[in-house]
């Protein structure tokens, strides 16, 4: 069973969403994520491991169609991304600024691999996931 750091993935997806004209750099985003955790009094764990995980997530999100290369006309520079429709659905499910975000994360965690394309499509298609009634 694959488990994911949804907070880190959320941060990466937000960086993709807001990344026109700038390179996507997962390692510094992981450092910022760790600093934010520490500021909230949470232990971020091993920083090198977190940086490695962020790079692995970048690759996974790209390979599985959650992010795609940003077109030049949208500020693409060959080193940044855009959210795909799948990536937008993922972000809307795990976004901590949306009330009730814990339930979709729990449902995703119950899957063998929540970011497997087929599994994610099946789970995210359930309208009840956002309402908390799967």
Image (spheres, rainbow, N blue to C red):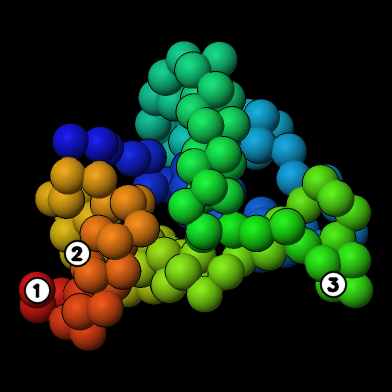
Residue 67 against residue 12 in the figure, above or below: below
Q: CA distance from mark 1 to mark 2?
A: 9 Å
Q: CA distance from mark 3 to mark 2?
A: 33 Å
**What residue do we see at 37% from left, 40% from top?**
5
Identify the disc placed on residue 74. Answer: 3
Res 24 quadrant in image: top right
- Mark 1 neighbour density, 10 Å: few (under 14) some (14–19) many (20 or more): few
Mark 3 vs mark 1: in front: 3
Residue 81 against residue 130 in the figure, above or below: above
Q: Which residue is mark 1?
A: 134
Sequence-wise first label, 3 or 2 = 3
**What residue do we see at 39% from left, 24% from top?**
43
Whether residue 83 is visible, yes or no, is yes
Q: Nearer the viewer, residue 61 or 101?
A: 61
Mark 1 vs mark 2: in front: 1
Query: Judging from the image, what secondary structure is the residue with disc 1 in?
Result: loop
Res 129 quadrant in image: bottom left
Query: Judging from the image, what secondary structure is the residue with disc 2 in?
Result: helix
**What residue do we see at 35% from left, 51% from top?**
115
Identify the disc placed on residue 103. Answer: 2
Sequence-wise first label, 1 or 2 = 2
Is the C-beta separation of discs 3 and 2 under 8 Å? Answer: no
Q: Nearer the viewer, residue 74 or 41?
A: 74
> How many numbered discs sit on the rendered protein?
3
Residue 4 appears at what percent x and percent y?
33, 40
Residue 96 appears at what percent x and percent y?
40, 62
């Amino acid at each position: 069973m694959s488990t994911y750091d949804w907070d880190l993935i959320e941060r990466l997806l937000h960086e993709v969403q807001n990344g026109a004209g700038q390179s996507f750099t997962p390692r510094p985003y992981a450092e910022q994520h760790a600093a934010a955790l520490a500021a909230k009094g949470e232990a971020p764990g091993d920083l090198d491991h977190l940086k490695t995980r962020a790079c692995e997530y970048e690759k996974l999100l790209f390979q599985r169609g959650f992010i795609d290369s940003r077109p030049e006309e949208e500020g693409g520079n060959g080193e940044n991304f855009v959210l795909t429709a799948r990536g937008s659905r993922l972000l809307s499910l795990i976004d901590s600024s949306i009330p009730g975000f814990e339930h979709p994360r729990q449902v995703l965690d119950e899957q063998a691999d929540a970011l497997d394309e087929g599994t994610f499509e099946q789970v995210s298609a359930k309208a009840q996931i956002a309402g908390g009634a799967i």
